[in-house]
Image: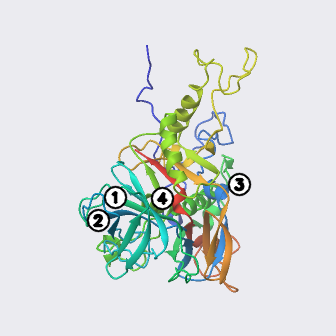
Amino acid sequence: MAGSIAATPTYQLQPSSNQVALASNYITDFNFLNQYLPDTYEKEFERYGNRTVSSFLRLVGAELPSNSDLIKWAEQGRLHTKYIDCGTVPVVGAGEIVIQVNDTLDPLDSTVAPGSGAIVQIAIRVGQTVVVSRNDGSGENKGIVIETDLTNDQFTVAFYEGGGFTGGSAIGAPDLTVFIYGSEFRKGTLGMEGSLEAEDFVFENSPIILKDTYTVSGSDMAQIGWIEVTTEDGGTGFLWYLKSEHETRLRFDDYLETSMLEAVPAEGGSGVLAQVTSDQVGNKGSEGIFYVVENRGNVWSGGNPAALADFDAIISRLDKQGSIEENVIFVDRDFGFDIDDMLAAQNSYGAGGTSYGLFDNDKDMALNLGFSGFRRGYDFYKTDWKYLNDPTMRGGLSGTGNVNGLLVPAGSTTVYDQVMGKNAKRPFLHVRYRASETEDRRYKTWITGSAGGAATSSLDAMEVNFLSERAVCTLGANNFFIFQD
């Protein structure tokens, strides 16, 4: 009979840190009236292991300086011309027809107002040869362009087939797809009339300022404890404030990464954009990785892809994008198991479920029931993402829009860097932080007050301040996949 995990006791989510006015707190529970002393374990037990979740951007990206409030970059458009929303008058058997292009401008084009529905200016010239295919799959013709009307986004095609055109309904209907495959000219004629100008897609992002602080009174800095503290960054000792200061630093380090994942821009009419209650908090937001991929990348929804047919659909979409050879899938635990089970099912000797993973498993060795990657059209490498599993972050969330995984192309891409004024190689994901010759805001930390070695004010405390100003650049978002419920 299948079992289940009991609802109680469960994992602890209550934060162990609290906001307290340490300057007024005095320890009052010393008890010397009891003659019996307990045995004490001085060192803390790390019951949750490594509690930090940052590591994703360190694995797949880089950090680069920037000296502006706005980061802009250009990405290449398509090389070839294809229109998928074309129509014509219903002239069956005609040797030539007029085709109307109804395609709207690419919504990723930053020069076009969202929702404008502007019609693309056609890039088809006289003499070019085209494939005219019916969108219902009923057939196709090949022809040559004999006339263009740029004002009305129309062109005339003469067909090579003796039977002429066999389809069409209405000039405004999306019945036809047309793409250019070459050209043909007679002997002794002039060259191609007109030329095409390359266009880039220009994207931008804005850095946000992140801050944190930790305050401890001078008296508490001088108070010894009986517990030897320990933190993930190696801090040890019997001074309790060291633990709180180190945990503040670790928490800030995590937020530097998670803010680059989760950040969204403030939309028009939003409460953030209109807020006037506080003049301290930010009111613009930034484009985080999840937001960019949801809007400019590829989205898999409705559960995890758990069959080869699902990955075939993903591969088919990647074929239509940048066709990046190597990709890394960062997954939560359930998605990782789904991939393992899918790959294990391909092993014809695995009916009992014990011969996959390492295919030379025997009774004297540990059984490997997992896979680190596979190849099907492209190379896919799988790795667990702690951020998606941690119950204090995205772990345990479910429902519409919850993230189960992220496919990231490996390697780098070439973009035009407007600050450098030239093409540059950049990782698909990288962080830009504010910096100049006199100010580096990648990761600032400083101490104020009159305790802990600082002597900047009369405050009997040590204040540790943290600050960073940064934004993430997601290049070639069309090559990314986000997997959601």
Question: Circle 4 is placed at which residue position?
Answer: 297
Nearer-N-terminus badge (3/1): 1
Nearer-N-terminus badge (2/3): 2
Q: CA distance from mark 1 to mark 2?
A: 11 Å
- What is the basis of the colouring in this image? rainbow
Mark 1 touching mark 2, by CB under 8 A? yes
Element carrying mark 3? loop
* Residue in the picture at 24% in, 61% down: 90
Query: Can residue 449 be seen by looking at this rendering?
Result: no
Q: CA distance from mark 3 to mark 1?
A: 78 Å
Question: Circle 1 is placed at which residue position?
Answer: 165
Element carrying mark 1? loop
Q: Amino acid at mark 3?
A: Gly
State left or right for residue 105 relative to residue 236.
left
Element carrying mark 2? strand
Question: Circle 3 is placed at which residue position?
Answer: 235
How crowded pointer 1 is (Cα within 10 Å; few <14, some 14-19, many 20+) is rated as many
Q: Which mark is residue 88?
A: 2
